[in-house]
Amino acid sequence: MTSMILRSSATAAVAALVVTVAAVPATAAGEVVTEVSAADRAAALSHWTPERIAQLGADDRLAPAETTAKKWDGQVPSGVGRLFVTFEPGGDMSCTATVVPSPGKDVALTAGHCLNGGFTREDDRVKTSNAVFVPGYADGKQPHGMFPVRAFAWSAQYDGPSSSGSDDAVIALDPVEGHHVEDVAGSQRISFDPLPSTVDTTILGYPVSRLARGESLVSCALPATYQTNSAYSYWQTNCDMAGGASGGPWLRDFDPATGDGTLFSVTSKGTMREDGTTADLSGAAFTDDVRALYERSATL
């Protein structure tokens, strides 16, 4: 079995409008920030047509359907949605993200590797473009609209897609028709408090597998156990979500009736079996660097 990151990309070639964004060097506070121009945000909205979104789940070579994870029954919980991004090289892809409380009501949390594509074999940085967030996405419907990403950031301690520590990123979103994302889609609580070694957990995501092809929210309700090694600490469950689930929330004290819980991790990696199914998921434990990143996200 091999470890894999769980963002999902189109397997077929898709003609893409490549919009370059400029990375700002890591600040003294310890972040790497990317700002997106107004023109590039407009281009991102134009890029993600319904047809282009559907293409992500249209290939028959997708991972097999999950058996532990099930399609979510009912309204998408507060603040949860699909994050769409283009990597060049790499093409179009999707992840999962969650709105979290912020003074400006326009911040969401996802996995770092959903926005940091790392480097090519030629040691050139992979370009990230066309980043948009669709809260409440369900079967092609966008009940709250599509929000362009105006900036995103990860901790300077995060070493890119090959790293499992501090695999978190924040995104700042433009309002849509004068409405902030938190006002229209809600948010999930977030906590950095110490937790017991086993936590009853609801994991949510949009895996682009044969079960839902990224079109429907999928969930697992399982105990998560705290693990640590010489490099980093993480949470682990037997959830079997495929690619596209990256960045999805790990929620404790979740109430299915209200759709509200407390975020304590996001999906980072999975272990893939030879048949293409996922054996388990891990979520990087929140670090002091991630806490500082979140606390400063209002400045994006």
Image (spheres, rainbow, N blue to C red):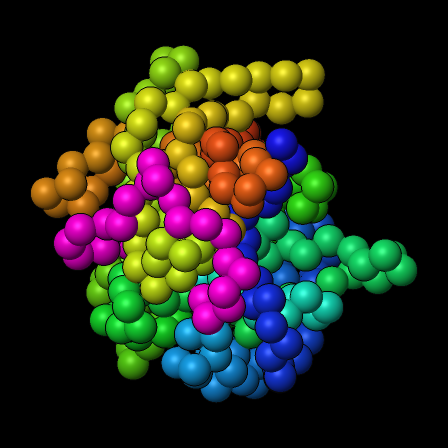
* Residue drawn where x is 34% and y is 64% of the image: 215
- Percent position of residue 170, x then y: 50, 52
> Is residue 278 a member of the stretch shown in magenta?
no
Tell me which secondary structure the magenta stretch mostly adopts. loop
- Percent position of residue 165, x then y: 62, 33
Relative to 213, say whether 245 is above or below: above
Q: Quadrant of residue 139?
A: bottom left
* Residue drawn where x is 27% and y is 50% of the image: 71
Quadrant (top left, top right, bottom left, bottom right) of the N terminus: top right
Instruction: Identify which residue, 207 or 34, lies in the foreground.
Output: 207
Residue 286 seen in the figure: no
Residue 238 seen in the figure: yes
Task: Give the residue at the far top of this rendering.
Answer: 197
Relative to 215, say whether 295 is above or below: above
Q: Quadrant of residue 237?
A: top left
Relative to 266, say whether 185 is above or below: below
- Percent position of residue 167, x then y: 58, 40
Q: Is residue 219 left or right of residue 242?
A: left
* Residue drawn where x is 23% and y is 55% of the image: 76
Task: Give the residue at the far right of this rendering.
Answer: 122
Looking at the rendering, the stretch of residues picked out in magenta corresponds to 56-82
- Percent position of residue 274, x then y: 60, 38
Instruction: Identify which residue, 196 or 207, lies in the foreground.
Output: 207
Q: How many marks?
A: 0
